[in-house]
């Protein structure tokens, strides 16, 4: 038995060493973006595309159409309260960037999906829930953080922030020893940056994802996407916990991101309560 355990540790160590080399050279064996959604994103990247053309592009993806309609009718993105049932109107209300984010959310779920009887199903589901909740909080907080013009990128950063952990967990069949919080927190951000760059998303999103655990890092000037991601990630965790641990959140109070957004463990519950209805309707669009 000790020999078997040592052998497993050697395999894990070899995998991590190989991963470190791949990350340093940016030559990691990355999962390709699903074809159907890759085609949609390629079309959305065309600066000349009109919103009616966007509606035609997504019309061939039924699940995406449903998600777009749900997002357009969510309280977070429908201030008027007027319900939309037409896809073209929904796309016009959301804009191309939000449509892109809906496609990314579905694509990552499809890419890193597993059967319900898999031993990793619960962890994958929790990672997806964390991503969507973080995205919703980031989108909602962006204006008060001085990042209103980056709301869509804030949402996308939240959706992609744990992509590296999803990738590591997807390798758990080969390396079950990696399916733990420590390994994913240590390696996930770097793997996530490599994947995001490989998929062609903005560099500032990749950088924010890579540095999401550097809570003490400081930079001059106002809050940026990384600051918003760090705060949103912790507030999302607080919202998802059955028994919220405000004492754990208190450890973040004196960090630059929380100070820049003027959020602490004292006012965090009130911030979440104020956003509760908007977040719930938005999250319903992603379930």
Image (tube, rainbow, N blue to C red):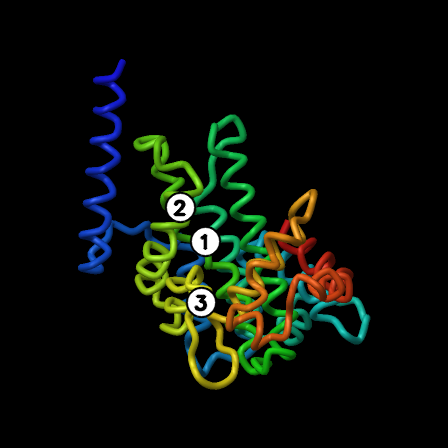
- Residue 54 visible (yes or no): no
Classify residue 85 by image quadrant. Answer: bottom right
Residue at 31% of width from left, 33% of height from top? 175
Q: Are marks 3 and 2 in contact (CB under 8 Å)?
A: no
Does residue 93 appear left or right of residue 104 in this picture? Answer: right
How far separated are the C-alphas under marks 3 and 1? 20 Å
Q: Locate residue 108, reporting x and y percent.
A: 46, 52
SS at circle 1: loop
Q: Is residue 251 above or below residue 258?
A: above
Depth check: 185 or 61 in front? Answer: 185
The percent coordinates of residue 76 (x first, y second) are: 71, 68
Residue most extreme to the top:
1
Q: Could you say where residue 105 lies in the image, as x and y percent from the top left?
A: 52, 56
Gap between marks 3 and 2, in whole Å?
20 Å
* Horizontal side, residue 71 vs residue 257: left or right: right
Quarter residue 102 falls in = bottom right
Taking depth in this image into account, of 41 and 5 the one nearest to the observer is: 5
The answer to the question of whether label 1 and label 2 lie on touching residues, with beta carbons closer than 8 A, is yes
Q: Which mark is residue 184?
A: 2
Question: Dot 3: what SS?
Answer: loop
The tag earlier along the polypeptide, 3 or 1, is 1
Query: Circle 3 sits on which residue?
Result: 216
Give me the disc on residue 162.
1
Q: Nearer the viewer, mark 1 or mark 2?
A: 2
């Amino acid at each position: 038995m000790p020999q078997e355990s040592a052998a497993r540790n050697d395999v894990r160590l070899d995998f991590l060493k190989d991963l470190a080399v791949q990350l340093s050279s940016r030559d990691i064996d990355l999962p390709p973006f699903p074809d159907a959604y890759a085609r949609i994103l390629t079309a959305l990247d065309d600066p000349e595309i009109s919103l009616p053309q966007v509606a035609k592009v997504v019309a061939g993806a039924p699940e995406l159409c449903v998600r777009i309609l749900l997002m357009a009718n969510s309280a977070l993105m429908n201030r008027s309260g007027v319900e939309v049932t037409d896809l073209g109107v929904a796309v016009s209300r959301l804009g191309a960037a939000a449509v892109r984010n809906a496609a990314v959310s579905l694509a990552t779920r499809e890419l890193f999906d597993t059967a319900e009887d898999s031993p990793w199903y619960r962890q994958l589901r929790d990672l997806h829930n964390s991503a969507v909740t973080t995205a919703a909080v980031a989108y909602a907080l962006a204006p008060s953080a001085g990042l209103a013009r980056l709301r869509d990128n804030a949402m996308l950063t939240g959706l992609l922030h744990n992509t590296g952990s999803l990738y590591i967990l997807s390798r758990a069949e080969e390396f079950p020893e990696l399916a733990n919080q420590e390994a994913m927190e240590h390696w996930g951000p770097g793997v996530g940056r490599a994947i995001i760059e490989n998929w062609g998303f903005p560099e500032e999103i990749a950088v924010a994802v890579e540095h999401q655990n550097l809570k003490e890092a400081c930079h001059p000037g106002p809050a940026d996407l990384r600051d918003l991601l760090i705060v949103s990630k912790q507030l999302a965790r607080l919202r998802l916990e059955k028994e919220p641990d405000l004492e754990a959140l208190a450890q973040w109070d004196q960090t630059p991101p929380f100070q820049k957004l003027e959020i602490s463990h004292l006012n965090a519950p009130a911030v979440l309560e104020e956003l509760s209805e908007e977040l719930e309707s938005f999250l319903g669009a992603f379930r």
